Image: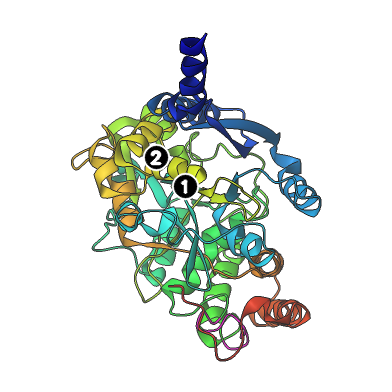
Amino acid sequence: MKRLICTLLVAWTLPALAAPVEIRLWRHDTGDVEMVASRAAVQRFNHAQGRWKVVVEAIPQGSYTESITAASLVGQLPCIIAMDQPTVPNFAWAGHIRPLDGLLPASAVAPLLEGGLGRYRGALYSVGQFDVVLALFARRSQLAALGIRIATPDHPYSAAEFHDVLVKAKRGGRYRFPLDLNGRFKGEWYSYAFSPWLRSAGTDLIDRRDYLRVDGFLNGDAAVGVGRYYGRLFKDGLVERIPADDKAFEQGRVLFHYTGSWKAREYAQQFGDDLVVMPPPDFGQGPKIGAASWQWGITRSCRQPEGAAAFLAHLIAPAEMAAASRDTGLVPVTAQSAALTEHYRPGGDWRIYFEFAQRFAQPRPATPGYPAISSAFEKAMADIRSGRDAAEAYDEAVEAIEHNIARNGGYGFDARTAGGSK
């Protein structure tokens, strides 16, 4: 009996025999290969150690943000949540997530490109495994037939040259509308695709030094010049205002397609070596593209932040990031992980997308007011596409954005506080 009691006491005190602590994770249900890759990553983490067990709950994407807001009101948020990177500052400002500085090893965070980081007021709040990048797609044979040079990262088309190229292609008679700008897309596409043109022109959606001033940036001379350039594309018949479908490039009805690397696999399979991947046009300060996709953060209500951080560190380790890239085809956000993949390693057939992410990617404004900024910019660009002058459209957007900022008390910024973001 004495031996039995001693055995039971030893077993009760051995931590190795304790069940792993569950870490709840929410993510939006994409219903595709990303879900399979995400489950595989969780399984590898759970099998690699016995202290923590990540449990995933997938929520329909259409109700995802509302679910987080509702859960926060009743204290039912999980430990880890997925967020679209531009929304991270809003989640931080609302108190849903906590800073990761001090929770994640600095050595794990340091190699991440801009596409792997989510910040607010200079603090890190999220990290990601992958990015997508914008590019200008064309076919080598079609460019050669028109005597048009291939733009390169070191020698992109200037904005003026690109307009001239489009005019030349239209006059050639083969292309009624030589450029596809994804005119059927709505929502975030406008800010993601076209606010980098503002950055390339030396201006922005907002003053990132304090995230309070929009007047003089979104409606300054440089921005208005970009807006009028965009409007002229439609006025001159170089881009179709409302395309009938989204297959113009595949079917040879346009010469160029300005879109994301999510088309890389499809276009490579269809066109092979005839496919050309080029940077967007340069408006004066070099080509720029949007940075960052979905990322991961830790909630303030999480009772196991150490375990949640261990999982995030697992996700951004080079081998794990490379595995996610191999499973999804998406662009990894460290040089070490890219080197471990077939497509993105130096010399790989998709290496150019990683190089674009390294050289040209710019984060969207790191302010909780970003959803309002993006919505106002979308309306302005839609109005410009319909024929409204850019100066009027951008003035209206500036008024709406600055009103939103004032109504929300500056979203945690004041005139003495720098934004702390690039």
- Helix, strand or loop at label 1? It is helix
Give the residue furthest to the left.
Answer: 347
Label 2 is placed on what type of residue? His
Mark 1 lies on residue: 309
The outermost residue toward the front is 2
Residue 161 is left or right of residue 65, and the answer is left
The answer to which of marks 1 and 2 sits earlier in the sequence is 1
- Pick the residue in front: 153 or 148: 153
Foreground of the two, 66 or 338: 66
Q: Nearer the viewer, residue 48 or 29?
A: 48
Residue span colored magenta: 207-216
Q: Mark 2 sits on what residue?
A: 314
Picture coordinates of residue 301, whole percent (x, y): 66, 52
In this rendering, the label closer to the viewer, 1 or 2: 1
Tell me: residue 395, above or below residue 273: below
Residue 41, given in percent of the width and then of the height, sits at 45, 30
- Whether 249 is among the magenta residues is no
User: Does residue 97 sit above or below 420 in this rendering?
Assistant: above
Whole-percent x, y for residue 234 in the image: 60, 62
Q: Which residue type does callout 1 highlight?
A: Ala
What residue lies at 42% left-to-right and 53% top-to-bottom?
A: 116
Q: Is residue 209 magenta?
A: yes
Image-based side of 343 in relation to 297, left or right: left
The residue carrying pointer 2 sits among few (fewer than 14), some (14 to 19) or many (20 or more) residues within 10 Å by Cα, namely some
Instruction: Give the residue displayed 71% in from the left and 43% down from the top.
Output: 64
